[in-house]
Image: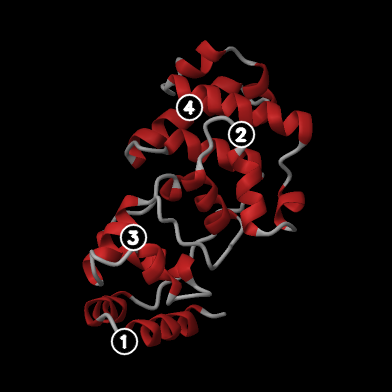
Amino acid sequence: MSHELVHTHLLEAAEPFAPDLHAALIRLGPLEFPRRDDVAFPEYLCRAISGQQISVKAAQSIWSRVVAGAEGADLIEHFAGCSHDALRGCGLSNSKAKTIQGIARAHLDAGLERDALAVVAAPERAARLTQLWGVGQWTADMMNMFYFGEEDIWPDGDLAARKALEALTSKRRKTLRTAERFKPYRSWLALYMWAHQDAPPDGEAIG
């Protein structure tokens, strides 16, 4: 559905019960939903992991060093074969280096191909991803939303999105329950909440 029609759907869902949310949606929208699928999925996942919980500037600097360290080699093969210390030397934390190497080895062993993952339902895809060491539900949600274009994901583990929805509706109502009202466009609802907070999700700006 076009972003204008999605915006209308969200407005109609918000108007009967949440005037503050309705006003915020009017002020913000319509928004375009970004897609980050211009690189191979394993590389995108690794890059998103590297950028989590740090500033965009720091994330870009670290990833530049990671890429430079590969010296032109295929990144996934480089991650699978290089030493843990080599990735740590680029500025990655111990856990991020371990996660990235695990993703690379899992892809080379069993495959994390875009086409194979794209044909399964979002919950199954998330379950597969969260089997990887260091990949949690929040990361799986971001992959589903921004890489695979799933329009109906509510990332309840995202503090910024959750707090924004609470502030614009009710702190007494669970955000999962509130978000139900906005099916089948809960991913878009999250996008508007991030825009309201001026807090893009980790990894988005560098994807």
Q: Residues within 10 Å of mark 2 (few under 14, many from 20)?
A: some
Identity, as a three-letter code, of the amino acid under mark 2: Leu
| First in residue order: circle 1 vs circle 3 | 1
Q: Is residue 95 something that shows in the picture?
A: yes
Q: Give the Cα separation between the discs numbered 3 and 4.
A: 24 Å
Q: Which residue is mark 1?
A: 15
Quadrant hosting residue 60: top left
User: Residue at 62% across / 55% down in the picture?
Assistant: 123
Q: Residue at x 47, y 65 (%)?
A: 187
How many dots with numbers?
4
Question: Within the image, what quadrant is residue 19 found in?
Answer: bottom left
Residue with the mark numbered 3: 194
Secondary structure, mark 2, is loop
Distance between the alpha carbons at the discs numbered 1 and 2: 41 Å
Q: Amino acid at mark 1?
A: Glu
Q: Mark 2 or mark 4: name the one nearer the start of the chain.
A: 4
Answer yes or no: do the residues labelled 1 and 3 have beta carbons within 8 Å? no
Q: Which mark is residue 132?
A: 2
Q: Are marks 2 and 3 in contact (CB under 8 Å)?
A: no
Q: Residue at x 40, y 35 (%)?
A: 59
Provide residue 113's location: percent of width, then percent of height: 73, 44
Q: Nearer the viewer, mark 4 or mark 1?
A: 1
* Label 2, label 4: how far apart the Cα atoms are: 12 Å
Residue 22 coordinates in the image, percent (x, y): 28, 81
First along the sequence among labels 1 and 2: 1
Residue count near mark 4 (Cα–Cα under 10 Å), binned few <14, some 14–19, many ≥20 = many
Give the x, y percent position of residue 56: 35, 41
Return the mark for residue 96.
Answer: 4
> Between marks 1 and 3, how big is the CA–CA gap?
20 Å
Question: Which numbered mark, 1 or 3, is in the foreground of this view?
Answer: 1
Residue at the outermost front position: 172
